[in-house]
């Protein structure tokens, strides 16, 4: 297991990122979430928790496509927007400390929320705890390379009790996202916060589907 990963705040850390026309800017514009579900093997009706549900873009998609969505976010402003547009149950709180029983969910979706969490292994352990055996972790997120060349994200996912089924570098979706961000905000500085985006330290965008196999190891709960 790797050491605690420093979270990055930046604009993602303040909730969802708005574009020039007030739209929500998301790498891949939601297509990545659709792809995660297509590759998940989940049945329709599956109970899916969206950790970092923001304004509910993914929850709205889940409702339209026959999944049973639940959302949690620490940002009250975007949660209020989600509440006005989806029927899913919504919770205000920390996505790394969930008010759910062990093994009660079919899937946990995390789109650009894990990278904001101070203790990645603990968050993954908590998500493993609330998933049933065979449940799915659906992850789409930015990921910074570490100096020793190890794949800290994959190591943490596996150490938490998951078997990785799909693991792809989808940095292609960052290109349009970053262009629209700069168009609106003038530079990338407010996006990545302290981590920056130097040429030798460029974030990747990862798409990962994993299955809960083992007993959870790193839950935030005692
Ligand atoms: C890019 S947005 C996600 C967009 C969302 N999936 C959608 O469908 O619109 C990332 C979200 O993660 C939330 N977040 C970050 N850290 C969190 C934490 N520890 N607990 C709960 N939510 C968190 C942020 O407030 C933000 O709304």
Image: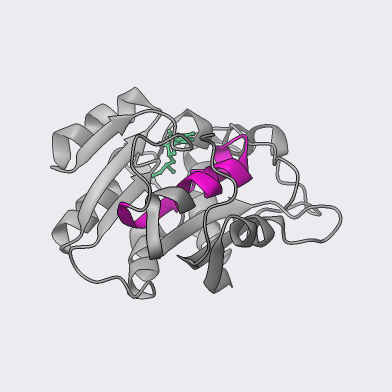
- Viewer-side residue, 1 vs 9: 1
- Viewer-side residue, 10 vs 71: 71
Q: Residue furthest right?
A: 148
Does the segment drawn in magenta span residue 163? no
Scheme of colours in the image: one colour
Left or right placement of residue 72 versus residue 127 in this view: left
Query: Is residue 197 positioned above or below 176 on the image?
Result: above
Residue 26 visible:
no
Image quarter (top left, top right, bottom left or bottom right) of the C terminus? top right
Magenta stretch, residue numbers: 104-127
Spot occupied by residue 1 in the image (x, y as percentages of width and height): 72, 53
Query: How many labels, in total?
Result: 0
Query: Is residue 132 positioned above or below 101 on the image?
Result: below
Spot occupied by residue 213 in the image (x, y as percentages of width and height): 50, 67
Name which residue lies at 74% across and 55% down: 145
Residue 175 visible:
yes
Left or right placement of residue 48 versus residue 207 in this view: left
Res. 109 image quadrant: bottom left
Res. 38 image quadrant: bottom left
Spot occupied by residue 95 in the image (x, y as percentages of width and height): 44, 37
Name which residue lies at 24% across and 35% down: 90
Res. 55 image quadrant: top left
Spot occupied by residue 162 in the image (x, y as percentages of width and height): 54, 63
Left or right placement of residue 208 versus residue 43 in this view: right
Ligand 1, by image quadrant, is top left
Name which residue lies at 50% across and 37% down: 12
């Amino acid at each position: 297991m790797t050491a605690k990963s420093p979270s990055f705040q930046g604009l993602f850390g303040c909730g969802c990122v708005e574009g020039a026309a007030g739209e929500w800017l998301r790498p891949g514009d939601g297509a990545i979430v659709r792809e995660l579900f297509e590759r998940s093997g989940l049945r329709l009706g599956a109970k899916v928790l969206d950790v970092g549900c923001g304004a509910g873009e993914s929850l709205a998609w889940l409702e339209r496509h026959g999944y049973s969505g639940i959302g949690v976010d620490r940002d009250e402003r975007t949660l209020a927007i989600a509440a006005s547009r989806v029927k899913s149950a919504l919770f205000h709180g920390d996505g790394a400390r969930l008010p759910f029983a062990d093994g009660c969910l079919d899937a946990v979706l995390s789109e650009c929320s894990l990278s904001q969490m101070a203790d990645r292994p603990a968050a993954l352990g908590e998500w493993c705890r609330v998933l049933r055996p065979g449940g799915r972790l659906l992850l789409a997120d930015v990921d910074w390379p570490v100096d020793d060349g190890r794949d800290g994200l994959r190591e943490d996912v596996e150490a938490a009790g998951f078997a990785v089924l799909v693991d792809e570098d989808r940095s292609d979706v960052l290109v349009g996202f970053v262009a629209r961000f700069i168009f609106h905000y003038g530079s990338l500085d407010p996006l990545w916060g302290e981590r920056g985006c130097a040429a030798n330290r460029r974030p990747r965008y990862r798409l990962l589907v994993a299955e809960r196999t083992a007993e959870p190891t790193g839950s935030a709960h005692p």
